[in-house]
Image (cartoon, coloured by chain):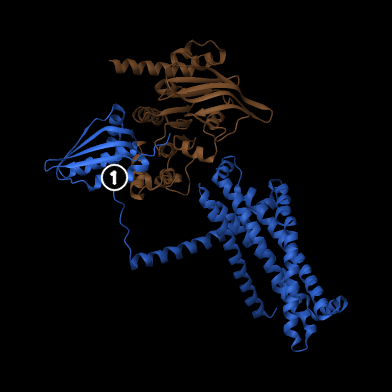
Amino acid sequence: MTETVPPYIEITSTDAAVTMTLRGPMTLPYVTQIDAKFEALPIDRTVRADLSGVTRFDTSAAWAIASLRARLETAGQHLEISGAGSGPESLLKSVSDAMPVITPAPVVAGGVIEWVADIGSAMADAATFVLELIGYFGLFLSRLVRSIRHPKEFRLTALVHHCQEVGFKAVPIVALMAFLIGVVLAFQGSTQLKQFGAEVFVVDLIAVSILRELGILLTSIIVAGRTASAFTAAIGSMKMREEIDAMRSLGLDPATTLFVPRILALVLMLPILGLIANVMGLFGGAIMAWIDLGISPAMFITRLVNGTDVSHLAAGMIKAPVFALIIGIVGCHAGMQVQSNAESLGRMTSSSVVTAIFAVIMADAVFSIFFAQIGF
Amino acid sequence: MAKDIHQADREVVISIRGLRNQFGTQVVHDNLDLDIYRGEIVGIVGGSGTGKSVLLRTIAGLNRPAAGSVDVLGLDVLSADQDDMGDTGANWGVMFQDGALFSSLTVRENVEVPMRTVEGLDPKIRRALADLKISMVGLPYFAGDKYPSELSGGMRKRAGLARALALDPQIVFLDEPTAGLDPIGAADFDQLILGLSRSLGLTVFLVTHDLDTLHAICDRIAVLAENRVLVTGTMQEMLKVDHPWVHDYFHGVRARAALDTKTAADVATKD
């Protein structure tokens, strides 16, 4: 079925005209070499092409001939074709009629001005993005208040479902992560503190760092990774398939039906996950302290209760609802930015995770400075 | 066996024998036979859920039937391996309902995708050929730089056709080419298919609900009913079939209207 013999082009040139005899298949796989031969022809005289030996002829060959004809006619010469059957003849005609008029793309001005403009528009985009996030926060609050005033509109089933998705199902990974962090902290802390003979302070090290910072921060980062992306993908694919528009046309408010249950579930679940992370982190630290330093569990608990103020726990937990709001709002906002192509869904999903993690760490830094200032 | 009329001496390009398709317990096709001849435009009609699109997907090798044989251009589609399919893939193109263009590529890049499989094709020529195909399906030059989401439904269908035609296939499968187009756009699309089919010598297999399309461009119509191809033939022959569904389909209010339009148009061209 497939032809292996390449086309054969014989060219005889006189002062008056060029005569070409073409044989064999003139099809797409050979069009590069055919066009190269045509390109090399002199265009200062008439060209005669004999197609009687052509076995196969497709659109690409018709294109090559039509381009040659266009070149010759620009130079004031012409192309005479003989021996073409009725099929190639009509194909040649429809291709010649359809030859696109190439309009050059507008030249983009480069240079410093463009560069400055790019920076400016990036800054403007960033500002708009922050404003939009604040807008979504307001939207969430207003719909939440509305749900409280009209409890019948509140979607309890959806809330419970999302609590299970973002909270309950995240427990194993969060617990394992926190346990390992506790182990690592105890191990690293003990090797340093041993040098000063201050091994027992490893308890304070573990307790303060896990309760104040690491427990909730690392939990939030894990939750941002698994939940912000899930929110974006779910809302984004609904946006892609016009489900959001359908909801609006049915009088359902996307903010009430989609955002409130999701974000509220996160706000309720993240403190619980953070608490689990704290417990598991301390547990991991206690185990490692026992193995590595011989600090018995009883001693660990005594030291923990006497030496660590409960304010450390409060300083950590107070951040949880804020982080939850950030993750939920970033995830829902990114989902609503998805356009009608698959590419943008992927882009927004990854951008929502990156933005959520970045924003959580930013907020954590702000909290640290604030707590340091007020001496909490 | 379908009632078939005066087709003895023409080359068969698609031959289906004893085809059976089923999803779970639901049988879509049973003992279905169909022949498609070179160079003709065949319209497949049938009620919703009679498996028109399933038939198209089966012939194009996108769906494995439970039983039967499908021969396309002498290749047994069902037992062919990936390499054979690759070779024959160049011989047919499929236009899906909404174009199924790759959303991350521009229209020109979409049309270039099948051409990338051709070894040694100069990228400049590939680009020029893609521009030519885009122009041949009646899209303006600037449409080549756009992404599918920036085009209207009709333009996406045209772009889908351009991609299906990229490798000069011998057969094109069109799934509801005129669905969702306005009547003027649909009529233009009909003429586009007819023109391309005649000038490129294409065999066209089209699934449609559009009676105007059937009247305007189809050489032959195949009716899917009772899990098989009930009858094939020209429009005139369809009008004489006395099966109740076929009769309702071609004698309904809409069918009458389409027929009147066609007759009026014929009279107008004769004058």
Residues A322 and A165: in front is A165
The picture places residue B230, in percent across and down from the top left corner, at: 55, 17
Q: Is residue B160 left or right of residue A313?
A: left
Residues B33 and B185: in front is B33
Q: Secondary structure at mark 1?
A: helix
Q: Is residue B258 left or right of residue A11?
A: right
The picture places residue B172, in percent across and down from the top left corner, at: 44, 32
Residue lying farthest to the right in this orientation: A298
Q: Is residue A274 left or right of residue B80?
A: right
Q: Is residue A311 in view from this perspective?
A: yes
Q: Quadrant of residue A22?
A: top left
Colour of chain B in the image: brown
Q: Which residue is at 52% across, 33% downward?
A: B60
Q: Which residue is at 36% across, 46% downward?
A: B126
Can you say whether B191 is above or below A263 in the image?
above
The picture places residue A310, in percent across and down from the top left corner, at: 78, 75
Q: Is residue A145 in view from this perspective?
A: no
* Residue type highlighted by circle 1: Asp
Colour of chain A in the image: blue
